[in-house]
Image (tube, grey):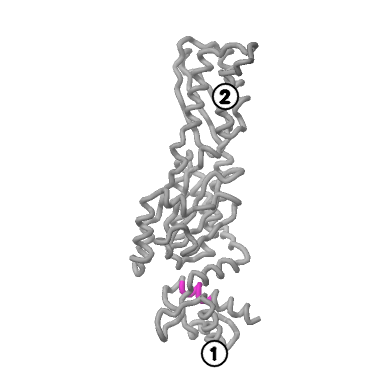
Amino acid sequence: MQEERRLAVLRAIVEDYVATEEPVGSKTLVERHHLNVSPATIRNDMAALEEEGYLHQPHTSAGRVPTDKGYRLFVDRLSTVKPTTSAERRAIASFLDGAVDLDDVVHRSVRLLAQLTRQVAVVQYPSLSRSTVRHVEIVALTPTRLLLVLILSSGRVEQRVVELEAALADDELAALRSRINLAATGEVIADAATALDALVRPADDDERAPAPSAAALAVVEALVEAMSDHRSDERVIVGGTANLARFGDSFETSVRPLLEAIEEHVVLLKLLGEATSGGAVTVRIGAEGPFEELASTSVVATGYGPDDALAALGIVGPTRMDYPGTMAAVRAVARYVSRILDES
């Protein structure tokens, strides 16, 4: 009973401090929360929580504020991530469903996350290396010019134009399209590239293999080049930087280091950390993160993408944040983005 009551006191202090940005005193707790105990009992509980490192008193006679340890206990004791409301779900769906391509999905997602959480949002582009090939389309623009369209599970579409030395008949084009899709569809990028290469470069001891046509060589070379293009693997989009203006009272400790980190995409990718695995929402609070200079920063992130997570998205901001609401928003946006990519 005593432990549950102290957890209730801690929960109330976290919620009030996030809402008011002011240290929370026992009188305030009695007035705002129905804890069904005397003010003296609450003061004793606050003193015990402070002694255990969950609360901190900024100065004598002031109320208490949560420590990183206090935030961590608060987050760990959340029984579930609170569900989004039907209105929030409709807003997310209507905002994201209008996206026309992968770039649009990523940019809409980062704007939406920043609006929902009032924090700095970070969305990593899907990793090409984790993608699988959904389909390869080959279209004859002219008898000697082909358009190759490589469609990946991440929603990414790569296009290449191939010039041929000689015209390609319709039946030859159909046969080449079939062979390429049979070899590559459903394979991860690395395996698909190897399989395509084997189509035109059979083993030396396979004397029965026919010599590949010039068209097949040109098409496979262009596709393998498209599959090895890793431009977006370490690319992130950031939104909501203006939200940091709300934390001007802690500029030197929280805002300045975070502004500097936003300039370094490698730093942001490391902040997102292990969020691409498991599908759960991960929360790293203060000094739990990988950078000492960002010890006043928390990260709430998760992986997104059909099947295995292809990339991560989340928010970064000062430790004083609405963790339940932020976790719910991050999870909801990730689920909708995953659905869009799966259906695209």
Query: Between 96 and 219, which is closer to the camera in this rendering?
Result: 219
Magenta stretch: dominant SS? helix
Closer mark to the observer between disc 1 and disc 2:
2
Residue occupying the point 53% across, 17% down: 216
In this image, 237 relative to 86: left or right?
left
Report which residue position mark 2 lands on: 196
Q: Where are the magenta residues, as a range?
A: 12-17
Marker count (numbered): 2
Residue occupying the point 52% across, 63% down: 325
Secondary structure at badge 2 equals helix
Q: Amino acid at mark 1?
A: Ala
Picture coordinates of residue 111, whole percent (x, y): 43, 51
Figure check: 267 above or below 323: above
- Disc 1, disc 2: CB below 8 Å? no
Picture coordinates of residue 45, whole percent (x, y): 56, 83
Query: Between 71 and 329, which is closer to the camera in this rendering?
Result: 71
Residue at the outermost top position = 166
Residue at the outermost front position = 205
Figure check: 318 above or below 204: below
Residue 70: which numbered mark, if any?
Answer: none
Which comes sooner in the sequence, label 1 or label 2? Answer: 1
Q: Dot 1, crowdedness within 10 Å: few (<14), some or many (≥20)?
A: few
Report which residue position mark 1 lands on: 40
Q: Is residue 14 magenta?
A: yes
Figure check: 208 above or below 100: above
In this image, 258 relative to 76: left or right?
left
Picture coordinates of residue 105, whole percent (x, y): 48, 44
Secondary structure at badge 1 equals helix
Q: CA distance from mark 1 to mark 2?
A: 75 Å
Q: Amino acid at mark 2?
A: Leu
